[in-house]
Image: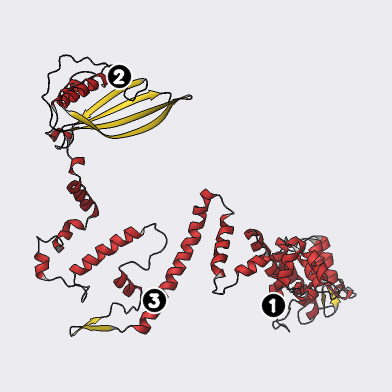
Amino acid sequence: MPAEHAALLLARIAVNGQPLATRFTDAAIDANDAAGNYVTELSAAAQPSLYASYALLHKVVRLMRVHGVTALDDLRWLLDNAADVGVLAFGDLPVSAEPPTDLFGDWLALARLRLLRATVPSAPELLRLGSKPASTLAQLRTAAADFGLSADDLAKLDAGRRAPYRDLRFLARLCAAAAQIKRLGVSAATCFAWADRDTDAAQADIARQIRQTAKSKYEAAAWLSTVTPMQDNMREHKRDGLLAHLIEKSLRIESPSVTVDGTVYANRKYWRNSEDVFNYFLIDVDMSACQLTSRIQEAISAVQTFVQRCFLNVEKPEVLISGAERADQVSLDAWSQWKWMKNYRIWEANRKIFLYPENWIEPALRDDKSPFFVELENELLQGKLPTRGPRPRCATTWRRCTRCTTSRWSGCITTSTTTRPSTTCRRRSTGCMSSGAPRPIPRPTSTAASTSTPGCGRPGSVSTSISPVSTSCRWCITVRCTCFGW
C-alpha cells in the first residue's frame, strides 16, 4: 500500500474514539525498565484495543483490494461521505465475533457504488449531492449529464422528484435505463409506452414499432441472422405457454374415457402431458428451434405416422382396419398400396413416369423417327462436324421435310445476349410440327444447302434442328434465327 494511503487510513480510522496513528505510536508500548525489559505486556488480554486496531486495519486493507479502491481521491471520498450516502464506512467494520449492527446492506451498497462508478465516474459525487437538502432538482439533473440522458428523459425517469438521487439503487437503475435507451435509440417516454402491458388495440402498433426500431440497427442482409436467435427463444417460450394452456384446458373440460358402441376407449382429447398431445396431433410438441423444417414436412410426417398407427390399430375407435381391407390388392384406395406410397421418392418417380412417360423414354428406344432424321443422325455420327457446325446439314433436312408435308408454326421464344458492348444478339427459336398426311418423300439429289436465307426478315443466318416427337405428328423442327444489331 502506498504511504499516502496508509497515512490517511491511520489518521481517519479510530477505535474507541482514538485514531490508529495515535494508538500505534503510544510511548507506553515501547516503555522499558532499568534492566531494559519491556514493562507493557503485549497480549490480547492485556491490550484489547491495540489488537482490535490491528485487526480493523487488516480488514480495511483487504476490503480496499476487493473493491478496487486504489486512487487516493476515492479513498478520501469514501472516508468523508460513506455515512451520508449510505455505504459501508471502513471504521464500522466489526472487530468482534458479534458486531453490534447488521452491516450487510451497507456492504452491498458499497459494491453497487463500485460497479456504478466504473460506468459513470461522476456517480459518487451525484450521490453526495443528492444527500444534501439544499440541492435543487435542476442541479441534480445537470450533475447527471454523464449518464448520457437528455433533460426530458431524466424528467420522465425521476418523475419530478429529487429524493431518488440520494438512493444508490435509483442511480443503478438509472444507469441501466440509460444504457437501454441508448441501445434502442428512442426516448424514455417511448420506452414507457412500450413497457405498457395492456391488451388493447395499440399493442399491435407498439409491437411493430419495437420490431422496426430493432431492424433499423442492422443491414438487411444481417437482420435475418440477427433476429433468428431471438425468434428461436421466443418460439420455445410460446411453445411452452401454448402446451401448458392446452393441457390445463383439456383436464378441465374433457373426460378420461369415451364410450363408442358399448366399448370404452381412452379419450384421445384428454391430455395429461405432452405425450398425450402428440398422440392426438401426431406432431412432436416438445421439439425445440434447433432444426429448420417446414409445414409441408411436418404434414408428411404426420400422415406417415397416422397410417402406421392405423396399421397398429391404435387409432380406434376412429379407424379400424379389418382383415379384408388388409388383403385388398385391387381397390385404388387399398391399404396395401402403402407399401410403395410410404416412400415419397419412389411414389414421386412412379407418378412422373406414369403421367409423363415421353420425358423418361430412352432416345435409342424410339421407333417413330422420320427417315430424314435418321439420315441426319447417321451423317452426324459418321464424320466430324464441319467448321460451321451442323447448320448446313440441318438446313438440308429442313427443306426435305417441307417438300413432303405441310408445316405449321407451333411456338416462338426470343432470348437476348450481349456479345459486344455495343451489339445485342437476339436468338429466336421457333417450333414447327407437321399437319395432315405426309406427301411422298422425294429422294434428295444434292446435300448442299444455302444458309443465307433470313429467317426473320433481317440480315442474319438460319439454323435448324429436327427431332422426332410423339406419333401424332411426324417430326418437330426448330428454327433459330440469329440477328445482330436489333
Which quadrant does the C terminus fall into?
Answer: top left
Residue named by callout 2: 453
The secondary structure type at the circle numbered 3 is helix
Residue named by callout 1: 105
In this picture, residue 484 sits left or right of residue 301: right
Nearer to me, 365 or 429: 429
The image quadrant of residue 194 is bottom right
Residue named by callout 3: 246
Q: Which residue is at a point 19% across and 15% down the rendered structure image?
A: 447
Q: How many neighbours does mark 2 have within 10 angstroms: few (below 14), some (14-19), or many (20 or more)? A: few
Q: Are marks 1 and 3 in contact (CB under 8 Å)?
A: no
Q: Nearer the viewer, mark 2 or mark 1?
A: 2
The image quadrant of residue 316 is bottom left
Q: How many neighbours does mark 3 have within 10 angstroms: few (below 14), some (14-19), or many (20 or more)? A: some
What amino acid does circle 1 point to? Gly
Query: Is residue 449 something that shows in the picture?
Result: yes
What amino acid does circle 2 point to? Thr
In this picture, residue 253 sits left or right of residue 305: right
Q: Which residue is at a point 15% across and 59% down the rendered structure image?
A: 337
Q: How many neighbours does mark 1 have within 10 angstroms: few (below 14), some (14-19), or many (20 or more)? A: few
Task: Please provide percent x and percent y for residue 216.
Answer: 58, 54
- Which residue is farthest right? 34
